[in-house]
Amino acid sequence: MTFTQQLRETNQDLFEMIFHHPFVEGIGRGDIAKEAVMHYVKADFEYLNAFMKIYAIAMSKSDTRSDIAFFHEQVGFTLHSETGPHMNLCDYIGVSYKELQGHPLPPTADHYVKHMMYHAYTGSLGEIYAALLPCPWTYLEIGKVLMEKYKPQANHPFYRWITFYADSGIEALTETLCKRLDACAEEASEAEKNRMRDAFRKSCQLELCFWEMSLTCETWPAGNIGVTAP
Ligand SMILES: Cc1ncc(C[n+]2csc(CCO)c2C)c(N)n1
């Protein structure tokens, strides 16, 4: 069994919890509360900005053109294609995308971004791959589970969201990340592999927490002071 197959198996509990989270099931049924969707898009727009910065840090730690090309391509993908699912959610709530941009991250999203930043700044390339991988992997599987369970047609309110994540593009990205992480793990010490395992599991936990944050419209206690520093 490869290192990433082991990671997937060890974290089956969290994948199952994600598939059954009420927000995710609400996407499948097409009936999530609009405030929750709005909270999600506001946080996710800033999350994607942070994700691209993490790719940039990872690029600065790359030794091969192939790694550099991969991160470059993924920044382009996140910048231009990941807006598609967000536009689907904006149409559902009837709010313009612009209005949902530039908001401070709620506590859980802030934690998730800083968790990835920590591994990006302090870790090896393998550790960064491990922290990033649950992002496409959980969404790919959510897409597939929802396709299978709800068989959405073009008139489903979240058809574009579901088909985007169930798509072969996200599958190819997940497979590429798995291959690259497996190659890093082959060269890594046991201590380094443990850091990869920890980074991967925490990202899975934070993916689950991100759905809960959106559902409950989580905010900072006593508000913030208007200073936004994602
Ligand atoms: C909290 C959260 N987790 C995952 C994704 C999905 N996603 C974000 S970036 C990316 C890969 C781009 O290279 C993917 C698949 C999301 N939108 N929000």
Image (cartoon, rainbow, N blue to C red):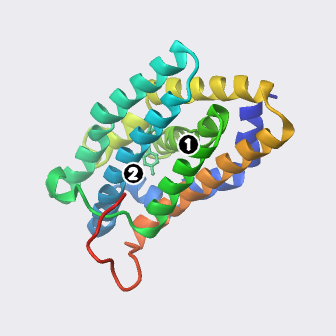
Closer-to-camera residue (90/123):
123
Q: Nearer the viewer, mark 1 or mark 2?
A: 1
Element under label 1? helix
Relative horizontal placement of residue 191, taking residue 200 as reference (left or right) = right
- Three-letter amino acid code at disc 1? Ala
Q: What element carries label 2?
A: helix
Q: From this viewpoint, is residue 20 visible?
A: no
- Which label is found at residue 196? none
For this orientation, the residue located farthest to the top is: 65
Could you tell me which residue is drawn at 40 percent across and 22 percent down? 73
- Crowding at label 1, few (<14), some or many (≥20) Cα neighbours within 10 Å? many
Say if disc 2 is inside 8 Å of ligand 1: yes
Residue at image mark 1: 120
What numbered label is drawn on residue 47?
Answer: 2
As drawn, the residue found furthest toward the right would be 190
Q: Callout 2: few (<14), some (14-19), or many (20+) C-alpha neighbours within 10 Å?
A: some
Whole-percent x, y for residue 202 in the image:
64, 55
Number of on-image labels: 2
- Is 213 displayed left or right of 194 in the figure? left
- On the picture, is 69 further left or further right than 41? right
73 up-or-down from 197: above or below? above
Which residue: 31% across, 42% down? 85
Residue 162 appears at what percent x and percent y? 39, 41
> Which amino acid type is marked by label 2?
Tyr
Which quadrant holds the C terminus?
bottom left
The quarter in which the N terminus is drawn is: top right
First of labels 1, 2 by sequence position = 2
Q: Residue 69's spot in the image, x, y percent? A: 45, 17
Residue at the (51%, 62%) spot, across then down: 111
